[in-house]
Image (tube, rainbow, N blue to C red):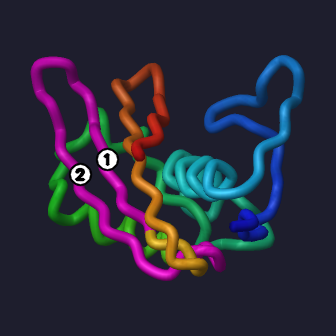
Amino acid sequence: MAESDFGADLSGVTDLTPTLEEVSGALCVAQRIARSWLTPSGGIWHDPGHGEDIRQSINAVVYPSRLAPRLQRQALRDECVEDAQVEVSFIEQTNTLEILATITLTDGTDLQFSLTHDGVTSKLLLGT
């Protein structure tokens, strides 16, 4: 089965790769969503509704039950996303915010990934 066209972009979540690699398909969507979760709200001048900066949640009181729906709404803004389920937890011992996402793409494919942020580093891990 041919891969659906979910666009292409330069690879990277918090920075570009040194070789300016491109990504496409589901990985492109996952990186795009993760970047939106790291972008300050209103941080893109032509799209004031874009962004839900989770980095601000590290030094604030985090209510996972309040943050999860905001991240879900942000994911659903992507035109390639049909449905999004988001779980958020805060691990006090490591001061880490963990986000688990199951995204249903418009072609019916389920995409699972996690995004963690510890106040310094953000990591995107794709599931199967």
- Residue visible at 44% across and 65% down in the picture: 110
* Marks 2,1: beta carbons within 8 A: yes
- Between 8 and 67, the residue placed more toward the observer is 8
Which stretch did the figure color magenta?
Answer: 77-103
Q: Secondary structure at mark 1?
A: strand
Query: Is residue 77 positioned above or below 89 on the image?
Result: below
Amino acid type of disc 1?
Answer: Ile
Q: Which residue is the site of mark 2?
A: 88
Amino acid type of disc 2?
Answer: Val
Which numbered disc flags the more N-terminal residue, 2 or 1? Answer: 2
Q: Main secondary structure of the magenta part?
A: strand
Q: Is residue 97 visible?
A: yes
Q: Is residue 40 visible?
A: no
- Residue visible at 51% across and 69% down in the picture: 109
Q: Which residue is the site of mark 1?
A: 99
Give coordinates of residue 45: x percent, y percent: 77, 65
